[in-house]
Amino acid sequence: MTRRSATVEDAGTVAGGGAESTAVARARHGFSSYLRADRSARLAVLAFVAVLGVALVLFLVFAHSQWFFLDDWDYLADRNAGDLGDLFRPHNEHWSTLPILVYRALWRLFGLRTYVPYQLIAILLHLTAAVLLRRVMRRAGVDPWIATAAASLFALFGFGYQNIVFAFQMAWGASLVLGLTHLLLADHDGPIGRRDWLGLLAGLAGMLCSGVAVAMTVAVGLSVLFRRGWRAAVFHTAPLGLLYIVWWLAFARGQYTTAGGSIDLVVRFITTGFAGAFGEMGQLPGAGLAPGAVLVAGVVLAWRGLDRAQLRRRAAAPGALLIGAALFLAIAGVGRASLFGPSVARSSRYLHIVAALSLPAIAVAAETLMRRWRVLGSVAIALLLVGLPGNIDFLVNYDARVKYGLGNPDLMLTFPRVSLARDVPRRLRPAPDLAPYVTIGWLLDGVAAGRIPRPGRAGPVIAPTANLRLSLLQSTRPTAASQCRVLRAPLTRTLVDGESVGINGGRIRVSLAQNPFIQVSYGIGYGRTLIAVHGPLTLRFESAHSSVRRAALCK
């Protein structure tokens, strides 16, 4: 009886509790799906961490011969540690206070004994930017694996090498990282609070690194405006804008002497920059057009069906960064397009920033296409990965492909070691073409302080080249333009101590008459007069870039 009753009771429970059982089953299924999704998300994070590790090794190993080059020397040799104003004096129109302080600290710790600590900071900033970009994508609702693919493309973006392995470009990398930090801290609902103050502090630090922060601040302002309204947007932008204007009026007025590009030139600069970034991300012929097509189609579909609240949360940051990329190129174009032409927008340092600011919107677009049409979405994701082999190949062969950017340690370290170094004026710049800010006096002081090591095994031309470069002092003494002779062919002259020649027009190459491989190149940026401070010297003069503009030699 008991057994039969139990059976009937069980049957009644099943019949009467079907709805409850179905709900439990659905809950279990939902929880199971959540666990699978959570596991997949964790694997995507682990995969991205592995990519970051590989990228770090690649940059350190295959760009190991990179050394101090051109702009590095401004932070090292052209700033007076006792002059507070030198911390605020711009470098190529950029406010660079924090990078200058970093260089000073590294100089005291490592000197010129190794480039790795300087370079490592730039590399780590690049990888940090990749992490922050992935975070922006995830907040915008991008699938973990799609976000990993897009952020991995940036982490391994070899064609952005200038901002990654040139230590000096840590200034741009810092502004990018601090700007993204500002964006993420400001990207929330509700009133102004602690996160906003921390974000504003990050924005301020970014402003003290480079002009990239101007575009980043505008992007943050647009994102906050769209999501939280004008009061929060003013909070995050007005103080930084006012501070930048004060700095510009006090220290940087007149620096934009090359500005004046037409609207047409600036527009071409912008389109060239986007085309270049997309092309280097895609690598294969025609693949550069794909990110643009994915971006336009996917973003429209992604944001068209969202209600206002969802749109504010998911579209604000990626959309603002995309506008920030265009603004960044516009600002650069005003100062550079008229001087170098729109093609300079394809320079590695510009491509790096444009790729960073474009990838979140591209990832959103790829996610949308994947949800709507799996085949088309799979193609979009493949396009995020197809450029990786080409970018990695560029890194692996970096030393062979980018020799002009590797610096010349043997020559620079030899200058203060030759006997002639102590017999020439301390203000003499021995390498105006390689290190325009370095004087022989600064090098001698570095040796005395133990911060400049002895050179390694230098080739046979290094010491004679060092002696030639130390034998000529470039001076601002005026020359008589009427006594100049255009160098249509090489000209040989002998100079004794104190005798000088003038230069005019383009760059001039000076070499030893008996050995033309011993040479130095001079422009007119540091003066139009070359004075022999050690002679007699029998020299050969010729135009360094005759196809662009011939130089002239003056009496």
Image (cartoon, grey):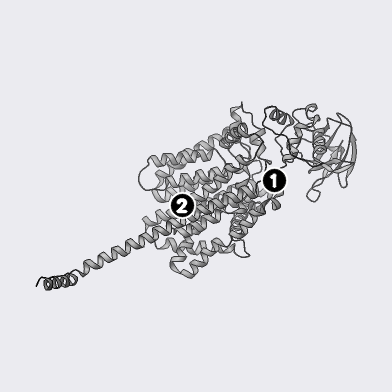
Answer yes or no: is residue 334 visible.
no
Q: Quadrant of the N terminus?
A: bottom left
Q: Residue at label 2?
A: 136
Left or right: where does residue 171 sit relative to residue 193? right
Label 1 secondary element? loop
Q: Residue at label 1?
A: 406
Q: Within the image, what quadrant is residue 33 found in?
A: bottom left
Q: In which quarter of the image is the C terminus?
A: top right
Label 2 secondary element? helix
Answer yes or no: is residue 179 visible.
yes
Amino acid at pointer 2: Val
Query: Residue 294 in the image: x percent, y percent?
Result: 52, 63
Foreground: disc 2 or disc 1:
1
Residue lying at 25% horizontally and 68% vertically, measured from the top left = 22
Amino acid at pointer 1: Leu
Residue lying at 63% horizontally and 35% vertically, measured from the top left = 75
Q: Within the image, what quadrant is residue 302 found in?
A: bottom left
Q: How crowded is mark 1: few (under 14 residues within 10 Å), some or many (20 or more)?
A: some
Query: Residue 4 in the image: x percent, y percent?
Result: 12, 73
Q: Which of 162 and 231 is in front in this view?
A: 162
Of label 2 and label 1, which has the lower sequence position? 2
Query: Residue 81 in the image: x percent, y percent?
Result: 62, 28
